[in-house]
Image (cartoon, rainbow, N blue to C red):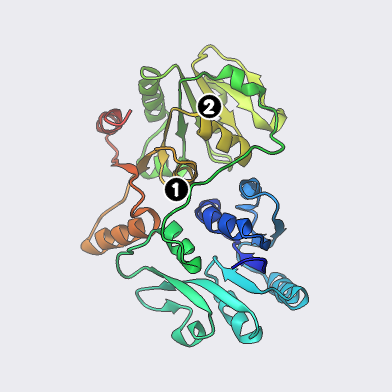
Amino acid sequence: MENKKILILKNDRAGDFISSVRLITELKNRNNLIDIYLSKFNYNFNFLIPDCNYKQISFDLKIVDKVKVCIDIFKNKYDAVFILSPKNFYYFLPLIFRNIKFYAIVVNGKKRNRPINFLRKYLHKFSVRNRNKKNKLNIIQSNLSLIDIKEIPDFKYFVKNSSNLNYFTHTSNNYIFFQFKYNFFKELNWSFKEFELIINFLETKYEKVIFSSDLEKNSFDELFEKNYSFIDFEKNATFIKKNNKRVIYLKKVDPLNLFLIIKKANKILGPHGLITQLAYLIGKQSINLFNFKIKSLNDYYHQKISFSEWYSNMGINFIFLNSDINKSIRKISKFI
């Protein structure tokens, strides 16, 4: 597929977008003109694929967004449309625009499929994500199969228009990056005390410990600022020094600087998800934390299916944790 005008529908979350970066890059490298719809959750990661025409619509597709997409397709006469965000509305577009080739990710669920088999007949090509049995392909391989690529290509990233990088003078050449997630700690019934125990352990292994938190405000934020040196990315990456110089909190770090921090880190540790996809994209090993709650055989099979969709064939390191913080640190220590 070369020298085509292509529209990509990808208005979902950041981790989902990152898993599609290789497919979109391959399409762009074939001299195609690429228009991409993103949501507010993944729009700021568009630096990963420069020189595309990015547009923003809502995550959950309001009526005005649906009209906007239809008018866009009608006016621009695309050669192909890639449905990479499996929203029901998108699967009706091939019925309306019969002269365009539609490529899509489709979902086979326990109770219903998305879309129904009737609508799949109008897709030029599709790749199936299973929610009712294990997947042979992970999410990246599934995307690439739409253009018949079986091997995952390397990703080459070049910094363009980088922000103030002077803050790297406060890090070192030997640091571990840790991602804090409030909900992950909440589900384990961990408090700031457990967080400190993890950080104190990591300090014994590396010159510096760099960590980030959720973009949404949470009850840990003030404690982070009070107890640790931090880089304030809301104020041009200003460095605020506290007594503990070996631990640095990234306050409200933006996607580009988060990417650069991960790229330079010696080790990457945190709950699975966005960080897993970013690290894998640039070929860095990450240590991924899981806290699945298994109450029945159905829960067990559901989690195996979910894992196969996102991480099968990726060779990632992963650890299952429970509320016992000392046992959890012992598990982490085997990978650090």
Residue 323 is left or right of residue 210, and the answer is left
The residue singled out by tag 2 in the image is 224
Are dots 2 and 1 in contact, CB under 8 Å? no
Work out which residue is located at the far bottom of the displayed protein and give it: 118
Residue at 65%, 85% in the rendered image: 96
Determine the image quadrant of residue 229: top right
Q: Earlier in the sequence, mark 2 or mark 1?
A: 2
Compared with residue 313, is residue 333 higher up or lower down, i.e. above or below? Answer: above
Q: Give the amino acid type for the residue marked by disc 1 in the picture.
A: Gly
Compared with residue 264, is residue 52 higher up or lower down, i.e. above or below? Answer: below
Where does residue 110 sit, x and y in percent of width and height?
34, 74
Q: Is residue 175 visible?
A: yes
Compared with residue 178, is residue 22 higher up or lower down, i.e. above or below? Answer: below
Residue 203 is left or right of residue 300, and the answer is right
Where does residue 107 sit, x and y in percent of width and height?
43, 72
Please state which of residues 65 and 181 is positioned toward the viewer in this rendering.
65
Determine the image quadrant of residue 5: bottom right
Work out which residue is located at the far top of the displayed protein and give it: 243
Please state which of residues 1 and 238 is positioned toward the viewer in this rendering.
1
The residue singled out by tag 1 in the image is 273
Residue 37 is left or right of residue 193, and the answer is right
Callout 2: SS: helix
Residue at 65%, 46% in the rendered image: 47
Where does residue 32 sit, x and y in percent of width and height?
66, 62
Q: Give the amino acid type for the residue marked by disc 2 in the picture.
A: Phe
Q: Is residue 212 visible?
A: no
